[in-house]
Each structure stands twice: as C-alpha cells, then as structure tokens.
Amino acid sequence: MDTRTMLEQVKNGEISIEEAESYFRKSPFEELGYAKLDSHRRVRSGFPEVVFCSGKPDAFLQDIYKRLYEAEGEVFGTRADVRQYELMKQVIPKIQYDEVTRVLKYENPDKERKGKIAVCTAGTADIPVAEEAAQTAEFFGSRVERIYDVGVSGLHRLLSKLDIIQEANCVVAIAGMEGALASVIGGLVNKPVIAVPTSVGYGANMHGLSALLTMINSCANGISVVNIDNGYGAGYIATQINRLGVETY
Amino acid sequence: MDTRTMLEQVKNGEISIEEAESYFRKSPFEELGYAKLDSHRRVRSGFPEVVFCSGKPDAFLQDIYKRLYEAEGEVFGTRADVRQYELMKQVIPKIQYDEVTRVLKYENPDKERKGKIAVCTAGTADIPVAEEAAQTAEFFGSRVERIYDVGVSGLHRLLSKLDIIQEANCVVAIAGMEGALASVIGGLVNKPVIAVPTSVGYGANMHGLSALLTMINSCANGISVVNIDNGYGAGYIATQINRLGVETY
Amino acid sequence: MDTRTMLEQVKNGEISIEEAESYFRKSPFEELGYAKLDSHRRVRSGFPEVVFCSGKPDAFLQDIYKRLYEAEGEVFGTRADVRQYELMKQVIPKIQYDEVTRVLKYENPDKERKGKIAVCTAGTADIPVAEEAAQTAEFFGSRVERIYDVGVSGLHRLLSKLDIIQEANCVVAIAGMEGALASVIGGLVNKPVIAVPTSVGYGANMHGLSALLTMINSCANGISVVNIDNGYGAGYIATQINRLGVETY
Amino acid sequence: MDTRTMLEQVKNGEISIEEAESYFRKSPFEELGYAKLDSHRRVRSGFPEVVFCSGKPDAFLQDIYKRLYEAEGEVFGTRADVRQYELMKQVIPKIQYDEVTRVLKYENPDKERKGKIAVCTAGTADIPVAEEAAQTAEFFGSRVERIYDVGVSGLHRLLSKLDIIQEANCVVAIAGMEGALASVIGGLVNKPVIAVPTSVGYGANMHGLSALLTMINSCANGISVVNIDNGYGAGYIATQINRLGVETY
Amino acid sequence: MDTRTMLEQVKNGEISIEEAESYFRKSPFEELGYAKLDSHRRVRSGFPEVVFCSGKPDAFLQDIYKRLYEAEGEVFGTRADVRQYELMKQVIPKIQYDEVTRVLKYENPDKERKGKIAVCTAGTADIPVAEEAAQTAEFFGSRVERIYDVGVSGLHRLLSKLDIIQEANCVVAIAGMEGALASVIGGLVNKPVIAVPTSVGYGANMHGLSALLTMINSCANGISVVNIDNGYGAGYIATQINRLGVETY
Amino acid sequence: MDTRTMLEQVKNGEISIEEAESYFRKSPFEELGYAKLDSHRRVRSGFPEVVFCSGKPDAFLQDIYKRLYEAEGEVFGTRADVRQYELMKQVIPKIQYDEVTRVLKYENPDKERKGKIAVCTAGTADIPVAEEAAQTAEFFGSRVERIYDVGVSGLHRLLSKLDIIQEANCVVAIAGMEGALASVIGGLVNKPVIAVPTSVGYGANMHGLSALLTMINSCANGISVVNIDNGYGAGYIATQINRLGVETY
Amino acid sequence: MDTRTMLEQVKNGEISIEEAESYFRKSPFEELGYAKLDSHRRVRSGFPEVVFCSGKPDAFLQDIYKRLYEAEGEVFGTRADVRQYELMKQVIPKIQYDEVTRVLKYENPDKERKGKIAVCTAGTADIPVAEEAAQTAEFFGSRVERIYDVGVSGLHRLLSKLDIIQEANCVVAIAGMEGALASVIGGLVNKPVIAVPTSVGYGANMHGLSALLTMINSCANGISVVNIDNGYGAGYIATQINRLGVETY
Amino acid sequence: MDTRTMLEQVKNGEISIEEAESYFRKSPFEELGYAKLDSHRRVRSGFPEVVFCSGKPDAFLQDIYKRLYEAEGEVFGTRADVRQYELMKQVIPKIQYDEVTRVLKYENPDKERKGKIAVCTAGTADIPVAEEAAQTAEFFGSRVERIYDVGVSGLHRLLSKLDIIQEANCVVAIAGMEGALASVIGGLVNKPVIAVPTSVGYGANMHGLSALLTMINSCANGISVVNIDNGYGAGYIATQINRLGVETY
C-alpha cells in the first residue's frame, strides 16, 4: 500500500489511526531494507554455515549438524569436545574429530583448494588456534600453508620460511605471550596480515589481552586483528582476502 | 617505479642493467644518523613510505619530505599541523594541507585509481579518521567511495547506501562511541571489513577503548580491527586487499 | 519526646548528658525517616519478593521458599540449581524448575498479564538471561513477547519482527559478544530500551564487560543498562515501565 | 507536529491528503553531504532532534541550528561553549545560553509540561549534568522537580524530600565520587530510577568509571544506568518513561 | 561549641533552655537552593564542616566561607587556588593561603592540640598531600608530627625516626610511585596506619592507582587506605582515632 | 666495633679492605635498626599471631597450630577448610571449626572483652567475611556487636539499629555488589569506619573490585578501606582503634 | 647469484620476471641475516634448553626429555605435574620431581657452581616460584643463596640477612601481595635486583598484577622486573648477570 | 671518591684515619628539613645521587644541584626544562642542557668509560628516553653504543647492527607502540636485556602500558623490564651489570 492510499483510508475511516501510525513508523525499513537484505542472503551464501559447538545443547547441536550435512553434504564445527563427537557420530557416522584442534567435521574429500594462505604460529601451544584457522580456510576452499613454531625469539626459524610466507595472498599470524610475531611478519610481506592473539601465556598476559594489545599497536603496516583465540574468524577473513587474489589467475 | 615494472623494462631493454643494478643495489636502508630511511620498503612491500608527522622535529621532517619528494615526485604525511604545513611549503611550494583531515601531501594529480574501497563512518565526528583512511588509500592507487554518517541508530541511512558498499573489494568501517557499525556492515557484505575504532565519545568510552572492544568481539564474520583512530593503517591494509581484487578485472 | 522536654530533663538531672547527646545525634532520622520508611514498605509491596538462589544455604532457602509460598500462594527464584530444586520440592511439591533458565518457581496459573514488554536476544546463548528477564516480568504481571536470535549480523531477522517490537511499552535488549543489538533497536523504537549485556563470548569480551561498555556508550537514544547477565533486574525495571503504560488503557 | 496529530487532522479534514502525503513522503533523511539529517526521527521516535554541540564545525552547527529552528520553531543543544553561542546568535537572535549547564536553546515559552520527573544530585558539582537532564526533559515536554545536594553522607537531606521524589513517574539519580545515591533512592521509590554517574571526583574515581560501576552493581531494584555525564541521555529516556505514565491521567 | 559542652552548660544553668533549644531546633540542614549546608554535621560527627574549594563557583564559595566563618570564628578549605584566595580575602581579610599545600584557612591561633598523629611521606613530592592531612588534623585539634622524605629506598632515614612514629596514636603513611612505605611502617608500629597513595610518579603508576593497589594489598597488619591524594580524608579519620586515644590521658 | 677502630685495623692490616667495605655498607642499619626492631617485637606482642590457613602445607600448618597453642593456650586461624580442621583436631582435640566462617580456632572461653566494635553487613552473603572480622576482633579482646543485612536498599533496617552502631568505638562496614553501605554509615556516626569490600556479586562487580572502588571514593568522611574479603584485616585495625577508646574508661 | 647476474638472466629470459621479483623481495635478509644467525646459535648455546612442561602433550614431552637427556646427560623442566613425572620416569628412570616446586629434572650431581645469586622471598607461599628461580640458576651453573620469608612487615628478618644478600652478584626478590620487598632490597644492595611478582594474595591483588605494578614503579634504583610467577625467567637473567661477575675472580 | 679507594688510601697512609673517620662518620643522611639527602648512598651503592628535576621547587633544586656539585665536582639531572636550566646556570655557570633529552648536567670531561652497553631504539621518537639511559650510563662510567631506529618492522636494519649489539655486556631495548623490539633482541644476544617501554604511540597503546605488557610477557629469555619512559632506571641497572663484566678485563 502506498502513502496516498493509506492516507485516503485514514480519511475514510477504513483503517484506524493506530494502524496508520504503526505503518509510518516502520516504512523506511520496509522500503529500503527488505529486498536488498533478501537478495543479499543469496549473495552471501558463498560461505556455508560453520557451527560454534561449545555450549550448544546436545539436541540442538545434533539437529544443526544433521540439517547442514543433509543440505551441503558436508559440515564443519569448531570448539567441540569428545562427548559432542560421540553424539554427532550417531547422526553422521563418518564424522571426524581431532582432540587437539577440537574441529568436528565431515568434509568433502575431493574439494578443490585455491590460492594460498600462510598460517604461522609463534609456538607449538598456538597450534590448536592455528588449526582452527587453517581448517576453516580449507573448508571454505582456500589452500593453506602451515608454518608453525617460528616465534621471534629464534628469528632464523622464521626467516628460513620467508619464501613460502611471501607467496601467500594473506598471512595469518598467531601468537600468545607477547604476540610480537605479527609485527615481524608485517615487516616482511606485502600482503595483508591477519593477527590472532592467543591466550597462551600466564601472569600479566591476562589470558591473551596482552598479545591483543601488542598486535593492535603494531608498528608494522598491513596488520589487522581478530579476537583472542579466534582462529575461525581469521580463517574466514583470510579466505575472503584469498578469494580476491585467487580470482586473478 | 615498482619492482615488477623495473624488471619488465630490463627485459624489454627500456632501461639498462646498470640502472637496474643501482636501483636494487642501494643499501636497503639509508643511514641518516638520527634515523634509517627504509629505501628498500618499496621493493619489499610495493608501498612508498608515508610520514607520521606528529611529534617529528622540524628539521628532520623537512629533510624527509624533501628526500621523499625528490625520489618519488610525490609525498604523503598524516597528523600534520598548520605549523608543519608552513615549514614544508618552504621546501615543496605546491604541497597541500587540510586542517580537518590533517593530511599534508603533494600527490600526482593524474594518478590512476583502481578497484574500490568503501569508507563508511558512523558519525560526522569520525570524518577526520575516515579521510586519513580514504586519502591514504587513494595515494596508494585505490578508488574510494565515501559513505559518511550512517551510524546504526538511524539504520535507514545505511541501508540506502547498501548497493555502493556491497560493490567494494574492502569496506573500512569507522566508528566511535559504541562502535556497532562494523558488526552491522559485517552482516551485510561478503568482502573483508577493516574496522577502525575512533576516540569519538566520552565517559566510559575511554578514548576509544570501548569501541575497540566492541569491534574485536563482533558477532559478524569477516571483520578485523586496527588501532584507535588509525585511519592510515586501515587505508594501507584496505589497499593491499583491494589490489588483490583489482588485478582480477 | 521533644527538644524542650529533653533539655528540661537534662537540667533537672532526670536524664544523663550521655543519653541526651545520643538522642540529638540521631534525631533528624527519627523525625524525618521512620514514618515515611514504614509507610513506604507498604507502597513498595506492589512487587513480591524474588529469591536469588545461588549460594544461599539450604535450610535458609527452604525457609524463605516456604514462608513466601505460604504468604503469597506463589514463589519465584532465579539462578537455582537442580539440587536446590530437589530440596524445595520437599516443601512445595508442585514447584517447577527449568535447567536452561535456572528459574525455580511456583506461579499462580491464572495470573492476568497486562501491557507488553518485548524481550529480544542477539543469539541463542543469551536465552537463559532472557528467560530470567521474561519470566520475572511475567511473574510481576507483565505480558511478554519473546524475540530471540535477532542479532545484528543478520539484520533481516530483526527487521522482520519490527511490528511486534514497536508495539511494546518497553524493550529488553539482551546481547553478549559485542552487544550491538541495543543500539540498533534503540534506533528503531520510541519506547525505553533496557539493555542487558551477557557474559556470552570469549577473549577480549572479558566475561561481558565489553558488551556492557558497548551498551553504555550507545549512540542511540533511549537506552539504559543493567549489570551483566542481570535478567532479573531488567525484568523488574521493565515491569515498572510497563505498569506506567498499562494503566493508560 | 507528531504523527498521530497529523493523522487525526487528516481524518478530520483539517489538513489535506496532499499536505500529509508530502510530510510522510519526504525522504527519511536529508542528505547534507557531510551529514544525514534524520528527518524521519520524529515520525519514528516522537522526539525532535537535539544537537550535541561539542566539536561540531562552526558552519555545520549554524546550518543545523537554522534548519531545525525553521522546521520546529525551537531548537535545543547540549555541551555548547560561549563561542558557539555567539555564532548561533547570528542566525537565531533570541537564542539563550547558560554557562554552567552549557545548554544552548530557544524553547517555545508556552510549552505545556506534563507528568513528573524527579532529578536528584548527590552534590552541587553534579548540577551541570543534572541541568542537562532536566532541561532536556523539559524541552521534550516533561515536568521536572529538581532536588539537588542530597548525597548519602547526610541522609536526612534526602529523607526530607522523599515525598516529592516518590510522586514522580521516573527518578534521575545523578552522582559522582562513589555514586551511592542511586542505590539509596532505588530502595525508597517504586518507579524506575535512571542513574547517571558523573566525572566529579578524583583519584581512584577514574573520571566517573568508579561511580558507573557502583550504579551498575546496585543492590537495589529498578535501577538502570546511562553513560558518565550523560544528562541528555537520562533526560531522554526519563521522558519516554514519563510519557507512558502521563497518558494515564 | 559541641553538643556535650552545650548539654553540660544546660545542666549547670550556664545557658538557658531557650538558647539550647534554638541550637538544637535549627533545621538539620540549611537550604541554600544550590546546596544544603549540613548544619547538623557538628551534632552528628563532632567535626566542623571543611570546604573542598576546587571547582566551586565563586559566589557559592564566598557565601560558604562567610557563613562558616561567622558561625565558627574560623574556616578551613582544601585544594584552593590563588584566585580563590583573592576572592575570599574580600570577605575574610585575615584569611591565609599557602600555594604548595593549597590550604585556604583562618584558624583560631590559640587552639589547643591534643594527642599525636605522625604524618610520614616517602618523598618530597608527597608533601602537598601530607600538609593537607597534617593541617586538617591540626584544625580538628590534633597534635601532628611531620616526618617527611623517609621512603623505603633509604631505610636508615625511616629507622632513625622510629621513636617519634611509634609514640603516635595514629600514623598517616603517604607515598606515590610504588607506595611501599605503608607496609614497612605497618610492620614497625602497633597503632593504626592510614595509608594515602599519591599521584606522584609516571608511567605504569597510572596516576596513583599503582600505589593504591600496593597499599590495599599490604602484607602488614593494621593498615587501611583512603583515596589517591586524599590528605583531607586521612587527616579526618586520623583525628577520629587520635581522639579515642587522647581521651585516655 | 666503632669506625675508628675499624679504620685502624684496616691501616694495620688486621682486617682486609673487603671486610671493612662490607662493614661500612651496612653500618647505618646496624646502628639504627636493630635494637629498636628487637624491642619493638616485644611492644608488638599485644597481638598474638593469627594463621592464614588457605594453601599452607599440612605438616607446616599442624606445626604452627601446635606451637601457637602450646605458647598461648589458644590459637586462631582464618580461611581453613574441613580437611584442615580434621588435621588440626589430631593435635588440638578441642579445636572448633565453622564451615560458613571458615574460622578454625581454640579460644580461651573466659576471655574478657572490652570496648565495642560494630560489625555491619549489607547482605547475608557478606556474613562469612563479617564473622572473620568479628571473631578476629573478639580473639584480640574486643567486644563486638553484629548488625547484619542492613544494606542501603532498605534503609529502615539500618536506621533502626542506629543506636547500637553509634555507640561503638569503630564500625566495620562490609558490603559487596556496589558497596554503598560504607558511605551511608560514614554519614551517620562520629567514629572511624573501616570499610571491607566483598567479592559478593557478579558481572561488572569484578570479584569485589567495584565495591572496593565505591568505598575508596566515598563522599562521606571518616572511612578507610582494606582489601576485598579481608575480614581479618578489618578486625585487626578495628581492635587497634577500639583499644585506644577502651583505655579511656 | 648476484644482482647483476640475476638482471642479465632476466634480460636474456633465462629466468622469469616472477622468479626475479621474489629474489629481490627477500634479498636483504639472506645477505645480512643467515650467517650471523647460525653462528649465533652456537654462541648462545652457553644455555642448555629448559622445558616448560605445563600443557605439553605427553608424547611430545617424553620425546623432548629423552632427546635432551641423551644430548646433554641432564635435563630440566618447570611446572610439571605428578602425572608427567610418572611418564618421564619411563624414559629417564633416575629423574627427580618435587611437588612443591614442580621442577622435574635430572641434574649432573657434581656440577660446579660459581659466583653467587641471592634468592629472597617475602613469604613462604612464594617459595615455589623461588625454587623455580633458584634451581634454574643452579642448573645453569650459578651458586644460589636462599633467603626465604623476609617480607617487609618484619624488617628485622631481612636486615639480619643483609651480609649474605650484599655479597651476591645479583639478587632475585620474589613477593606477592603488595610486592614491597623489591624496593626495600633495592635500597640496600649495590648489585642488580631482578624482581619477580607472584600471584600470592587475593582480592585487589588481581593474581599478581598489583605486585607487578609495585615493582615496576619502584622508587629504588637497580630494579627490573619479569612476569608474574616467572621464576625461570629470573633464574635465567640472574645467571647471565652472575656470569659477568663470576668471570672476574 | 668511593669506599674502596678511601680504604685503600687509609691502608697506604695516603689519607689519615681522622680524614677517613670524618667521611664515614657523617650521618648517613643530611637533614634539609624538606628532605633527607642520602649521603650514605655512595657508600651503600657505589653510585652518586642523580636528580629527578621534574616538579621540584626551584629553591630546592638549586640547593641540591649546588650541594651535589660541591661534593662531587659534577652533577647530573633528568627531565629538566629550560626554565630550570636557566636557574641552575645561576649556581653552576658551566652546566649543560639539551632540550631533546632533557638532561641537565655538568660532567667531568675526562671521565674514563669502561665496558660496553648497547642502547637500541625501535624508532626515532624513542630517542629522548634512549638518551636519558645512555647519558645516565655514561655519567656512571659506562661506555655506550647507540643503535637507533632499528624497529622490527624493518628487520634488516636491526640485523645489520648485530655485531655491535652482541659485543655489549648489557643491551637496553627501548620501544613504544607494540614494544616487540625487546623480544627480537632477546633472541639474538646472550647478555641481559633491559627493556624500556615508552609512551610513544596512541590509542590502545594507553601511554605505554601496552608496550610494557609486551615486554613483561616476552617469549625470549634474558629480558627484564623497567617502568615506562624510565631511561634513567635502565641506565642505572645496565651500569650495575656492565660493572660486573668490566671488572673481568
């Protein structure tokens, strides 16, 4: 109904003033918002849904896994525990779980992976977060190079991998404790660096807050930061960036 | 001139091996005594050096501006003040300054700009940071769309610009106060969002820390964050991302 | 006893100086405070007492539940655990408990509910806090509309419920992570919004502190904030507001 | 004129459908280039726009004041300085300014005020914030009772004013330092209390953060909190609450 | 005159019941419009009112100084500036001001001082806070020993003054930087220690917050803490404690 | 040995330069410190040692309890658990333990208690801290009045106990959540108030930090603060204060 | 390959532009970095590797212990638990474990120890951190003096050990709660003091952050600080310092 | 003259026992009324007193400079301003001042400097702090190598200076922003690294707190940290360390 029709019906008493008032209060959203948002849903569907398992009620989780698996033929979840693995196995027998990375997935085995993302960690304790990032990016179709344990206190380890890192479309730099890795990598590559602080450390590290601050204050160019331990988020944005580069070749 | 162009000209015989050698041979940094100008930066990163003017001693700043201008034919600095503008005018008469954005630059007028970056702000008070981002990106060769004053408290303003925002290779979302803009945009686009918290606000905003936390904790995918008021950093990484997309077309 | 009588008795030695001194020290409170405070107790009794179960000693809790149930014919407690449920069942056999919401109550089944409060959450993990708010408000006689999982990263979900939200006398906006929901709703309604940050999230969310800061710094009008996870507090003040509106019709 | 009045006049034939159509048809915001004036705000929220003067460029501020004054016949701004007052006087000669409260307004002198809001402060140093709240509420049509300097360290002062406070539809409790006033008032009234922490204090007060925390953690029911020194925000939501109560009588 | 003296004179017939009645009958506060002067304070607490000058409007301050001086024959204010001194001189010509301590007072020259309070500082930069404490305590009738510049990095300085410190009824320990003085003194005396953190220091001292935390966490017994730079508060409570001891002898 | 003798022996080669150097490095402490410190130990012995049980190795704890009990005929420990109680019972069969207060003690049953300390709590959840304070003070010989559950949200409860509170030599005000109790009591008594923040609360209470900040910033006079949940510390300093008053009568 | 050869091959088409580009991007690191870094490894090997056991996967830990033991004939790990001890015993039967210090090591019994490091603690609860420091330093060949439980609240305990402390090449000062020990020792010795804050304490101690701040802000000279509970780090740097002194004699 | 020299001269008869006695006999501190000059400091620590000029009253500062200059023949102060320079020139005409470093000193021109300290900065903005450290160390007799502007974002700059850095007895690593320099240097040298965070940066750097946290959490061995901008403290402890190494040769 357009404005004039609405007003005429008000005048004629065909609709009440209250109805008309409520119509005008929300009209700009109806006009502007809906169509775009709906079409947008389709645009955005380049990324399948990923499940954050931690804390989800069992029945709910089983339902989501089943539904996603039926719709997509594959399914991917992060921060799952062994108990959840057992439960999902009931609905998707071939589902796979790894205790270190806490990823619970069934992934199409012959998925083509494109471009290149380098996922680097400062230490071995950062690997769970790194694998969350790497496997997320792989699930979304990115090729991933893993370069682990190249923290800045032994610089030669990092420099010896420079070739591989410099070839990537995007670098994910993952570090706990003081988080200096991101700054050093930022100075060595010409592609975006997504920095992931981890909660690895103790004392004044404050569960990763210190590493987060380090990364946000980085003196190097081309670094931006996601939440502490947010491997998934890094894998997601790194894939968005990688896709821009991938479509080049 | 960048590395690839240089090498192509070597191959085509447009420049001699000697010229190219001298280009690559120059020490990767130039020792000024008080500082080490990173002349290898362009080779390594493909980005010319940009000057952070605030707090630099006068003579030092003039020297850097002169040196960069002579080497590149253009020069770009952020967070300059009027006094510094007057001083740089002495060495580069045609240099330009804008008090709101605090950018002090001479930019090649016929530079070709490619791709697209959308720079969005929540309010008008965020514009200085936005212009630092936009002009940085433009100086580095990106095309920029400015979409200002589209904060989430009047959602229809943002939705009416959705078309333009969705076309960009990268969105820079700039907001102070509670910084919710990044999350809302993150849910509406399928390209990376670089979030910039600003120090706009008061009270529990704590000079932008609150907006930074909002953005780091965003529930939306595809968002990563730079330091408070760091328009330059956002413009830099957005250009890195845009370049990946640009080379596609 | 009035001042003159008191002084005369001091003079006559009928009361000691110490007694008189202590009388004058507290007299303004006796004169001004008591009567009002007592009558106020009765005024305030529009709200029955609600029990915060967590950490209460068992015997004490049983006693309170029994006493309240005998006095009011119903009883309502928040943050109870299963063990407490078993204990209260001993004294009030028909008491009801729900593990997700942790509400432990017996509520008059034919209570009339008036007005309307909209209780909205950003995600499904915020539902326990939302139910604490909703059931508190219902126990106090408010009609409640539940609109869950309408976080800002998928704006169409929220906009599709706008009708219902705009009709309420008060909106309770509940969100963890970055807590942007409150700002977006604040821009869409013309009634007060009570924002409840939740501890849902991880990393730099700092157990809800980040969401709290977002909400306190909101750029939207008409928003005020209660403590992290304080569903009860939101349900209480929302009912106070709803009652003002209810008495209109 | 508000939406409901407009619709009633349409119904009664007091204004033509064409006039009404042009009112509703106007784009929901007015593009000023640097800003988007939210002309749909009154339709959506029933509140005219209020100007946050601090930091706004001069020309922009003059333009907004002029535009709002022409549209509404009155205009209201907070956190203005003397220089801005002089500038606005050029475009609205009868505009009024008060240095203590920093309110810069022209207000319709015969505006009817309804209902009642009690604005209470702990000390005299909180009065500027209180006046921002009180005058905002008055501009929006609320009747306001001012009860200043009733901090909890001299409880008899507060108790002596209890009658007036208990009659209000909403209480605004404003305090710096430790901010205990809100809790004490919360225990004495049965209407919503909007608590405003102020930056009054020193040392571990941390510019009002301490008072904010006190208020958010209040043990009393019916309290919610706005940002530090945010008198405007308190006046706004208090008016929303007051309107619900006003329409009762 | 204090309450007890008044009552004794009533008993002895030295003043009439009428005179006493008028003393006690006066309203427990005086309504000044902008403020409520707490005239009941002396009855309740045995302490005359002290003025916190910083930020008080000029007319208000003059009015308060005049009123207090007329009532008590003396007046005492803290954190005054030179301009305020000039203004108060207009109403109380013999008023005295000291720029270092920022105390603005006229004090009865032949006041008897009783008991003993030791006021100790770690460094010379803490002296302004110490003098605020010492002169406050003296104004309230305590005898004060000043022991300045006895910080823990040169322990022999403190140990050489141990005799004097151990004789006091109460010790005020004032320190900025890391604030260790309170713990060391706490281990050396058997009387209460009131610790005052100061904002002296830089960097991670965070304007005194670090010293405050040190003092609150002290491993020594018998220490309690007031706000950063709160010399007045320390002088007040030290006097309360000293009075308990004084009445012994 | 004095300085001259020392120097003569250096000259004569009777002692080495190294020995002399080390002598002079520490001499001021030997001269000033020792005697005083030793005599001080005896002075300080007015307070018997109290045991902080939490985290002490079993054998060590048994040893301490046994030794103290043998020396004093009584023994007092805080923050003990049931297991420690069982262990101490092995060495002191008549030892007593209370799970709520976590005090593990054997106290001389006919100890005379003097003076008066009022221990007040805002809520029932603060009682464990309050009992730690009260029983500590009683163990040290103070008479204690317990006034529990008099939080500021129901002011009449506090005012009805004013007589008892005003008679004490020292008031201990214990509160979690927003901690406003200390300020209100501070305004009602003329004796020192020792404020104890507790970790009771949730969310932005940050384990008692919020209550601590409230108390440190109190607008009332005569308040000083000890660490969060530090009932023992409050009982200790309250006793020091009470003793000063006790010796009066 | 040198630059000229490279360029000639580009010209001749012997290598592609892409290969050349990648060569030039990383050249400065190859030239400068490698040789030095590798030779540096040998230089640095004065310190054998130490294992941070906490959180290491079992198989990985066994492997490291085995490998280090085979290479060095001894092995040293910190923050181990009993379960890890049992596991390592399988591969190194004579390995030793201490539950209090959590050190898991086999150390060459006839290692010569040189120089002197004094390891001091404020309390007994700091001993686990102290032993981590002491045993680390001993494993690295330093002689260590343990001076435990010399906190500043009983100064005579510390002063009585002054001789021993003043003879060390480096002092490690370990304290939780308010951490004042470092400042006091700093004022008593002429050698570097490495301060170690511990997480011993509660409430506003914030898991050692308060002690860290105390130590960082110390008014004494010659103090620097390592992370909370970082005994290993202190033992390491203390050994570096001690070695400088050791080589003197 | 230091203690050891004095004693050697006593032994050798170069000075009389009387002269030596008067040296040692002087009270370990000099009472100035407002301060206690620690004349025992040199005996205790081997370091002459250095003046922290900022905030010292003029007369006091002149007095101290004069006194120290007369006693030592030289004098050294940090954080002085131009006005203080003018004032000190009145008492010590040949005193020298440098605006960038803010050091105000007269130093013996032919002082022998021993050992080696490397003072490194990340950027040019860190130079004032670096010079405070370097000149402090030089005043105390250390040889200093300055290596400025070698931040981690251009790693080749640092690596090119590795030789010089590795030869030092102690490295001072100075950095603002994210402070990663200390970790990288820590991994490259085998001597102690004293890390100095600076307040250089903006936004989430929080005046150096972020760099401080980075350094405290460093993953590299052999790093300890002093307060933000505390160049003096670093120069002091670096000298203590350097002296240990110096005496070797």
Image: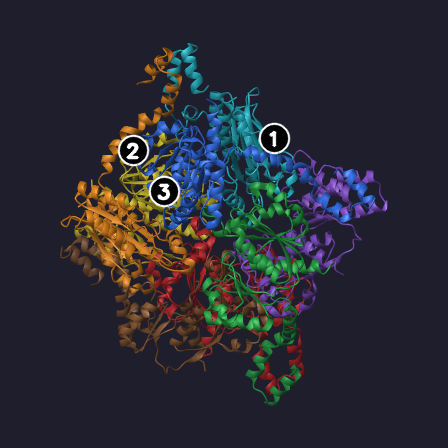
Chain colours: A orange, B yellow, C blue, D cyan, E purple, F green, G brown, H red
Residues packed near mark 2 inside 10 Å, few (<14), some (14 to 19) or many (20 plus)? some
Asked whether F219 or C119 is in front, the reply is C119
Q: Residue at x 15, y 56 (%)?
A: G15
Residues packed near mark 3 inside 10 Å, few (<14), some (14 to 19) or many (20 plus)? some
- Whether labels 2 and 1 share one chain: no
Subunit of label 3: C
Subunit of label 2: B
Q: Which mark is residue C98?
A: 3
Residue bearing mark 2: B164
Asked whether E19 or G228 is in front, the reply is E19
Secondary structure found at label 3: loop
- Whether labels 3 and 2 share one chain: no
Looking at the rendered image, the quarter that the C terminus of chain E falls into is bottom right
Up the image or down, B101 lies above or below D19; here it is: below
Q: Amino acid at mark 3?
A: Asp
Residue bearing mark 1: D164
